[in-house]
Structure formats: C-alpha cells, structure tokens
Amino acid sequence: MPNQPEVIYMFAMSLDGFIARPNGSFDWLENYPANADFDFDAFLASVTGIVMGRGSYDAARRLEEWAYGRYPCVVATSRPVENLPAGTVAMAAEPAELLADLRARGADGRIWLFGGGDLVPQFIEAGVLDTIEIGIIPVILGNGISAFGGAQPDRWLDLDFAKPLANGAIHARYITRHRRP
C-alpha cells in the first residue's frame, strides 16, 4: 500500500487536558487566540480535508459563519444532521472509511482530525493518526471534554518539537509510533 497523506489531530487544550468546558464552550480560548507564533493560517493552508467529531461540528455551526467550506468535510456521527453545509457529509464509519470518503471527494493531502476527543482514540487504535499538534494553553479548567477521550492504554509518542509562544502558551508536535508503513 502506498504511503497515505498525513492525518493530524491539531487542537488547543487547557493545561489539564481539556478541549472544551463540559457544556462544549471554548470561551477560555478567547484570551489565547492562535497568533502569528502558532501560524494557524499556514496550518489551514496545508489541509485538504477534515474529519470532525459531532460535538466539534455542532460547536463550529454555532459560530456566525461556516469557516470550512473550502474543504471536503465528514462529520463522524450516528445521529442525523440537518442542513449540512456544501461539501460536508455525515456518516457513522470506521476511521479508514471516513478517510476513504474524504479522499474520494478530493482530499489528496493532509487530513485534519478536528476535535473529537472520543474519535481520536479510534484513529490511534486504527493506526491512521500520524501527528498530534497541540497548543497548550496556561489555564486549568478543572473539568470538561477530554482531548483524548476516556481511559485507554498507554500511548507513547515521539516529540517533533515544542516551543513557548509569546502569549504564554506552548506549541508542541508529536509523531505517533503507529505510523503507517
């Protein structure tokens, strides 16, 4: 099987490992917008498709505009979704099937695993998650939605880089040890 394009879980989390408050709010990120140090715009330019968890999709749809219309997008969910934006489908499937759907719709490069704390362990277990890139925000939320879902086996990663940002956050990238051949 030829090498597949990279699948990356890129996100921001609190120092204690949460991507959102228990109600799904990420208002705490307003104090730490992705600035030039993090180069979020360059990251977005490198993406060719997106797999979203249902909670992340619902949160993104609450914003004023759908910011992901230029990408083929699949929402991983078993619940019906109404009024999907153009280029977006919803499906309940294994990670490999979600990725195959995106690739069939033109995502021929980097795939962004957007949110989905419950989805991430599935991608790791399936051996299709290559990179984890994190903005670690210096706030302790105390509880919320975990960046990596619930209990699971130990997963060791290889550090690619870590650097402090001017706003006090840390930008880090890890390579999974479950890389595809």
Image (tube, rainbow, N blue to C red):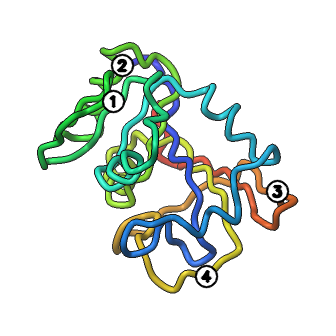
The residue closer to the viewer here, 145 or 61, is: 61
Name which residue type carries label 3: Lys
Q: In front: mark 3 or mark 4?
A: 4
- Left or right placement of residue 74 versus residue 9 in this view: left
Label 4 vs label 2: CA separation? Answer: 38 Å
Label 2 vs label 1: CA separation? Answer: 6 Å
Disc 3 secondary structure class: strand
Of all residues, the one furthest to the bottom in this rendering is 142
Q: Position of residue 62 (x, y in %)?
A: 38, 51
Label 1 vs label 4: CA separation? Answer: 33 Å
Badge 3 is on which residue?
A: 163
Q: Position of residue 56 (x, y in %)?
A: 38, 52
Q: Earlier in the sequence, mark 4 or mark 2?
A: 2
Of all residues, the one furthest to the front in this rendering is 64
The residue closer to the viewer here, 104 or 20, is: 20
Badge 1 is on which residue?
A: 99
Q: Which mark is residue 140?
A: 4
